[in-house]
Image: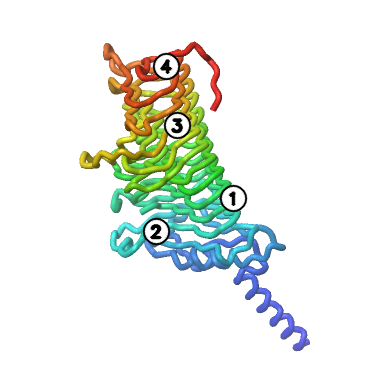
Amino acid sequence: MSYVLVSLLIFYIIASSNFSLGYGQTTFNVLDYGAVGNGQIDDSKAFVKAWNASCLTKASKGTPTLVIPAEKTFLLQPTIFSGSSSSNIGVRVEILGKIVAPKNPDAWKGCVESWLSFGDVTNLIIYGTGEINGQGSLWWSYALHFSKCNNLELSGLTHVDSPKGHISITHSNNVTISNLHIRAPQTSPNTDGIDISVSSHVNIHDSIIETGDDCIALNNGSSFINITNIACGPGHGISVGSLGVNGSYQTAEEIYVRNCSFNGTQNGARIKTWQGGSGYARKILFEHITLIAVNHPIIIDQHYCNGRHDCANATRAVNVSDVTYNDFQGTSSSKEAIVFNCTQTPGCSNIVMKQINITSAIQSQNISAYCSNANGTFSTTVPQVPCLLKTNSTSFNL
């Protein structure tokens, strides 16, 4: 009998050990790894311990799920979640509670570019009804940063007051972002909602973004991007760029923005490039857009200087071409509703505008379009664009 009891005890110890290491389970609650969840004690080490355990899950057991439970507030220092030891089955992260950044700016000392970073993870899915709060009002780096995360899904969460940009995606392919609510004060600097760079086949849809900067910024290396059903405002609109900073070669192409609204934003559909750069922004479509008192509803700026006035003139610029604007309806809060501020060389080419009806948000104020060094066509467009050729066509190809 004693032999049997000892054997059972040994079996239990081994089984429990394997369970705690992640070999025999698929659900990993951060509370089981030492997290407290009172918003005061640093839970960073517990989160990393639970993450590492989930990454050890054998593929035969199924996709592991890291759980951040409801009704808890977890304080995290700047933390890196590496997927170098995870299998290709990926990791699911279910956020039901609240995650907050440290209030003390000393936590951000050193070379810290982001608060929560995920890297080298394939098939990462982050979802839930919880909140990620960057405490940005106390310390204005990126809240969530994803690098080399192919087949990434991000949905359902609320992102509040990032210390800088809220979500950054880089070097990642096949990404889906949906049903997010991102918000920061209108006056908060550099609080982009979603920044994309060196990534392709990204779908962003059905989200509300209220920030102090770009709602969505499509930077260098962005391609095959689909953006639909985004409510943007306040903020600086949906921007392609900026591209070509410091004379660099940068590109963006195959970008499609549909069924989006801009409410009280500084810009609506924007393309911005620096003088002296090279590369291209091409095959871009904005269509079915609603405007409510937008300062610059449509703008291409090849003289972008990030608000400064000391950028030197240059003969070289990023080439902007094959841009279509279709079905814009709403109001402008400025006199110039459409601005094509293009460089003399190479300028902006093959700009197509159709079914544009922008009126003034201010009673009795007339609106107009400014156009320099752009060529293309327009039809049924108010206000008319002086440097484009008027046509009667109602169809277009991108």
* Residue 180 drawn above or below residue 113: above
* Mark before the other along the chain sequence, 2 or 1: 2
Give the distance between the C-alpha atoms of the residues marked 3 and 1, in whole angstroms. Answer: 30 Å
Horizontal side of 63 relative to 121 (left or right) equals right
* In this rendering, the label closer to the viewer, 4 or 2: 4
**Which residue, given by chain and number where applicable, does mark 1 sit on?**
151
**Which residue, given by chain and number where applicable, does mark 3 sit on?**
321
Q: Residues within 10 Å of mark 2 (few under 14, many from 20)?
A: some
Q: Residue at x 39, y 30 (%)?
A: 348
**Which residue, given by chain and number where applicable, does mark 2 sit on?**
39
Give the distance between the C-alpha atoms of the residues marked 2 and 1, in whole angstroms. Answer: 32 Å
How many tags in the picture? 4
**Which residue, given by chain and number where applicable, does mark 4 sit on?**
389
Give the distance between the C-alpha atoms of the residues marked 3 and 2, in whole angstroms. Answer: 50 Å
The amino acid type found where label 3 is placed reads Ser
* Mark before the other along the chain sequence, 3 or 1: 1
Residue 129 location (% of width, % of height): 51, 46
Q: Quarter of the image containing the N terminus?
A: bottom right
The amino acid type found where label 1 is placed reads Asn
* Mark before the other along the chain sequence, 3 or 2: 2
Residue 266 visible at all: no
Give the distance between the C-alpha atoms of the residues marked 1 and 4, in whole angstroms. Answer: 43 Å
* Mark before the other along the chain sequence, 3 or 4: 3
The amino acid type found where label 2 is placed reads Gly
Residue 177 location (% of width, % of height): 53, 43
* In this rendering, the label closer to the viewer, 3 or 1: 3
